[in-house]
Amino acid sequence: MPRTRIFIDSPELYDAIYHFKNYARESDRLRSLIDEVVPGARTILDVACGTGEHAKFLKHHYGVDGIDINESYLHAARMKNPSGNYICADMIDFNLGRTYDVVTCLFSAIGIVRTFEHLEHAIGCMARHVRPGGALIVEPWFTPEHWHPGKPLILDGEVGVDKVYRLSISVAEGQLSVLLYNYLRGTPASIEHYSDRVELGLFTRDEMTWAFEFAGMEVRYEFEGLIGRGLYIGTHASEIPPGVLC
């Protein structure tokens, strides 16, 4: 029987599967955007920071902190960015007791909140960590009309001498996109098999926009974004919404 939700909890294997992502180029694009919307920005909070691949490049220009629910990923992020403060926390309910020039939530991690109610909570929580004049930048998951399930996809990578593969198939369940993953890791001594099921919320443009506006932010949408999925860019015109607690 395959083991469940172990493979992807490994930061080394996660990075191996997503080795094709050009984090350096994405970080350069993000820097250009930050220079445009928050000139002179010095601090970033990366929500759902994962293994810290963006911070590895952004740390040369900003003080970068992060939160994630996976402690193994946070350990990897701390190794890549030792000066950063990395906290294990859920994006829908966290309070770091401070604000940042820029808060980011990238690589479609916002989809993991699954429901519109949780989306409102998450965007509100992030917005309350943005200083007056700062920005919240969120890279969305697919909208319902742009989600086309059913096509199998294979990704591969390497960890040392081990070969790793991920075969995925996607289905739709109501307002959720469901990703069914099967992983193989070939070692010199054996082949290991793991499985995973990931559910991501399919939010409309109007729902995303409403969540920002409900959090007291002005928002614009950039179609291209970092990898073609777009970006929502929210700004506080003057004051942070009342209260720091989420």
Image (spheres, helix red, strand yellow):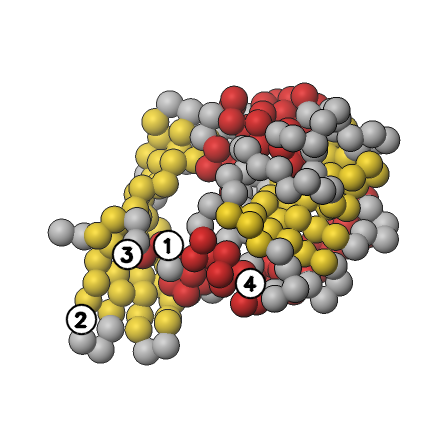
Q: Which residue is mark 1?
A: 9
CA gap, disc 4 and disc 2: 31 Å
Badge 1: residue crowd in 10 Å (few <14, some 14–19, many ≥20)? few
Residue 128 image offset from top left, x and y in percent:
70, 33
The residue tagged 3 is 183
Q: Residue at the location (51% across, 23% down)?
A: 116
Sequence-wise, the earlier of marks 1 and 4 is 1
Lower sequence index among marks 4 and 2 = 4
Single out the mark in the foreground, 4 or 2. 4
Dot 1 amino acid type? Asp
Q: Compute the Cα span from label 1 to label 4.
A: 16 Å
Mark before the other along the chain sequence, 3 or 4 = 4
Instruction: Name which quarter of the figure residue 55 lies in.
Output: bottom right
Q: What is the crowding at mark 4: few (fewer than 14 residues within 10 Å), some, or many (at least 20)?
A: many
Of label 1 and label 2, which has the lower sequence position?
1
Which residue is disc 2 drawn over?
190
Q: Give, as a three-letter code, the residue at label 3.
A: Tyr
Placement of 170 over or under 157, stated as above or below: above
| Marks 1 and 2, how far apart at CA | 20 Å
**Helix, strand or loop for disc 2:** loop
| Tag in front: 3 or 1 | 1
Label 3 and label 4: CA atoms lie apart by 26 Å
Indicate the quadrant where residue 6 lies.
bottom left
Q: Are marks 3 and 1 in contact (CB under 8 Å)?
A: no
Is disc 3 in contact with disc 2, using a CB cutoff of under 8 Å? no
Q: Which of these two is toward me, 68 or 229?
A: 68
Report the residue at 37% width, 71% height from top.
158
Q: Dot 1 lies on which element? A: helix
Discs 1, 4 touching: Cβ within 8 Å:
no
Mark 3–mark 2 Cα distance, whole angstroms, equals: 14 Å
Label 4, on which residue?
Answer: 78
Q: Nearer the viewer, residue 142 or 83?
A: 83
